[in-house]
Amino acid sequence: MWGYSNKRGVFFPADPQLNTIFARTHIPCGMLYGMQEHIWEREYRKPKLVTGGNEPQASVKEFLRWIRRGEPGNDGDLAKSGLGPKRLPFPLEKISILDLGCGNGKNSNYICTLDISNRAVGIDISETALNEARAQAYGMEVEEQSQYFKHSIGEKLPFPDASFDIALDVTSSNSLNEKERATYLAEVHRALKPGGYLFVRALCKDGDANAQNLIKMNPGPEKDTYILPGLGLTERVFSKEDFSWVYAGAGFDILYLDKETHYTKFAGRSYKRNFWIAYLQKKQRS
């Protein structure tokens, strides 16, 4: 038995702890979205950077294969070297997912299709994105396994401690300021179960001449931030040293860390962008 629907059609999972999460049909948003909220709403209505579609991110699918197979890490240095510690396989069934800055829900909806017992909660500050996520979930027949609502990932999360097996941050936290980032790190750590996984795709400063030029020509208000011309969006890029320091300091073991390069079209031009791909795990209490 995986759960039931009440008279209003709201799905409640069988897991008593997740009942608290899925029972929330509306959760009030705070006021710390800053000026980024209307920028993201505009971006989802008329995309310049955001990629749509139902296909999950390739890097997310690879991460899922990695934890399912129980592959070794790369000790943060040697990509796919197989030199890291051996881990136990992590079956992708009966799991709970927190999709941070879920966008159109393509990653969390995909995970729901892997097993009927999987559950996903997605949060975003764009109502347009959330409507797309709900519609996509319905089209993929996973609407009873997922719930999407408006909330900033830079605010306290309305979930009990140790609620989720996996959290996804697919280039979502790059627009947080440092105060919001501290809240995001503490809250994700709290909401994950002991040994739970955090996938992060973050903007990379190392070897990215475009990012370094933007920091110089369009600097943001904080360290290693810039303001994207034409969008007004503030983004944070990380050196490898900074990324490791921030996430390890927040209570996560870095199991895998590698850099990947993509090209993004913006205003009719193609720009190189580097990203960190990180597989993190909430540290077990000793």
Image (cartoon, rainbow, N blue to C red):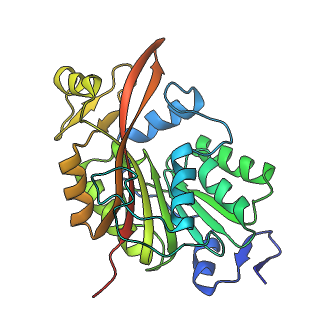
Position above or below: 19 against 57: below
Question: In x, y percent, where is residue 63?
Answer: 51, 56
Q: Position of residue 91 (x, y in %)?
A: 61, 72
- Indicate whether 40 appears above or below 248: above
Q: Residue at x 83, y 75 (%)?
A: 7
Point out residue 35 in the picture as x, y percentages from the top left corner. 36, 38
Side of 253 where 89 appears, left or right? right
Q: Is residue 54 above or below residue 207?
A: below
Quarter holding the C terminus is bottom left
**Residue closest to the eye, 155 or 61:** 61
Q: Is residue 183 positioned above or below 140 on the image?
A: below
Q: Residue 221, position in %: x, y?
A: 18, 37
Tell me which residue sits at (44%, 16%) in the image. 270
Q: How many marks?
A: 0
> Closest to the observer: 100 or 37?
100
Q: Quadrant of residue 251?
A: bottom left
Quadrant in which the N terminus appears = bottom right
Question: In this rendering, does residue 150 appear at all?
Answer: no
In the image, farthest residue toward the right: 7
Say whether residue 3 is visible. Answer: yes
Foreground residue, 179 or 193? 193
Left or right, residue 195 beside residue 137: left
As drawn, is 243 to the left or to the right of 184?
left
Q: Could you say which quadrant of the image residue 271 lies in? A: top left
* Residue at image location 41% in from the left, 65% down from the top: 72
Q: Residue furthest top?
A: 268
